[in-house]
Image (cartoon, rainbow, N blue to C red):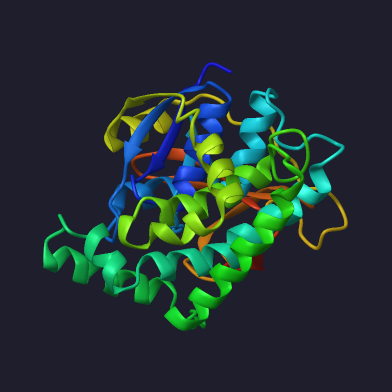
């Protein structure tokens, strides 16, 4: 693979931290494009066509959305250390899905309770903080978000579960080897750990805290800065894309006009022509005036494909 790995992210994004940690564990070099925290995001949409969740990974004209898919792709690119070892992959992926949903929505509201938010946003101008709050309210519209009371109870319960899981002195969550479960749980707890007024909740769970510090220790690999204009130019200049195909029997045909959107929050759809579909992923082709022909890849789980009417 000659194309550079380009991660579009921002510093405080938990799911970005998950991918950064995987890049670090695998010792990979990557280009770092910092994207706006709130809309508008014109350079993001030029590449994704509508999807605006963070992060996404660009490899030439291939755009990989959602951290679950990104981590699977990175594991195929650099198999060591493996994130989905056969002996632990089932447990690891179930733990990862729980962490990316249930644990995430306990950790984030807990960390951003008033005293946590005051510390986390201490250097942020009030108008920027207000814009962030408005953006996230629209982003999760229609979703029943946990209250602080809900999040507090859930986080305490989940930390107790993890402490019990680590009670046999294992080094990693799903067994003797590092796995996707470690990074999926770690990014949620990292978000709490980085906010001093609320980070004390982790001190009550010494095995969890020691495991978290081990998991965070390798860092983020070898990043180098890139601006979004360069990334768009790289997509436009790409001459090939990852091979994909539409598997039979999954309800869609190659060339269908479709939209793909998340099913929980951040529901902005990406329209395009279906060029890839399996039980694991879905890929649409779309053309942007600046980025050219791009293939946008999504996980199949957690995303909905809809056929669109084509005007004759």
306 relative to 20 in the view: left or right:
right
- Which residue is nearer to you in this view: 170 or 105? 170
Quarter residue 109 falls in: bottom left
Q: Position of residue 10 (x, y in %)?
A: 34, 46
- Of 300 and 179, nearer the camera is 179
Q: Say which quarter of the image contains residue 245.
A: top right
- Residue 112 vertical placement versus 37 (above, below): below
Image point (20%, 66%), residue name:
129
Q: Quadrant of the N terminus?
A: top right
Q: Nearer the viewer, residue 12 or 263?
A: 12
Question: In this picture, is 250 found above or below 35?
Answer: below
Q: Residue at 48% x, 64% y: name it.
A: 107
Question: How many numbered discs sit on the rendered protein?
Answer: 0
Quadrant in the picture for the C terminus: bottom right
**Residue 171 sits in which quadrant?**
top right
Residue 164 location in percent, x, y? 71, 57
Q: Nearer the viewer, residue 261 or 257?
A: 261
Give how far across and how far down residue 262 sits, in percent. Answer: 57, 65
Direction top: furthest residue: 2
Residue 246, position as x, y percentages in the image = 77, 47
Task: Please tell me which residue is depicted at 54% across the width and 77% down the height of the picture.
Answer: 153
Please say whether residue 257 is visible from this viewpoint.
no
- Kindly tell me whether residue 104 is visible in this rendering: yes
């Amino acid at each position: 693979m000659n194309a550079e790995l380009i991660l579009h992210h921002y510093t405080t994004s938990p799911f970005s931290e998950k991918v950064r940690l995987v890049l670090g564990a695998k010792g990979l070099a990557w280009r770092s494009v910092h994207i706006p925290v709130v809309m508008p995001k014109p350079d993001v949409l030029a590449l994704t066509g509508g999807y605006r969740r963070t992060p996404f990974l660009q490899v030439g004209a291939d755009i990989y959305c959602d951290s679950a898919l990104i981590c699977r792709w990175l594991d195929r690119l650099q198999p060591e250390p493996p994130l989905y070892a056969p002996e632990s992959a089932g447990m690891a992926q179930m733990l990862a899905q729980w962490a990316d949903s249930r644990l995430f929505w306990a950790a984030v509201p807990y960390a951003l309770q008033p005293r946590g938010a005051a510390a986390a946003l201490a250097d942020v101008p009030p108008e920027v903080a207000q814009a962030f709050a408005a953006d996230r309210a629209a982003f999760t519209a229609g979703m029943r978000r946990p209250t602080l009371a809900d999040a507090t109870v859930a986080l305490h319960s989940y930390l107790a579960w993890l402490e019990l899981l680590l009670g046999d002195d294992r080094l990693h969550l799903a067994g003797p080897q590092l796995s996707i479960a470690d990074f999926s749980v770690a990014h949620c707890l990292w978000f709490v750990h980085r906010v001093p007024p609320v980070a004390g909740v982790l001190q009550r769970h010494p095995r969890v805290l020691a495991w978290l510090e081990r998991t965070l220790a390798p860092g983020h690999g070898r990043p180098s800065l890139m601006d979004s204009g360069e990334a768009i130019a790289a997509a436009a200049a790409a001459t090939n894309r990852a091979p994909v195909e539409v598997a039979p029997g999954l309800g869609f045909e190659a060339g269908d006009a479709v939209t793909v959107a998340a099913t929980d929050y951040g529901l902005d759809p990406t329209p395009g022509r279906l060029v890839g579909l399996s039980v694991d992923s879905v890929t649409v082709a779309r053309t942007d005036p600046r980025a050219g022909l791009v293939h946008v890849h999504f996980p199949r789980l957690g995303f909905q494909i809809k056929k669109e009417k084509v005007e004759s």
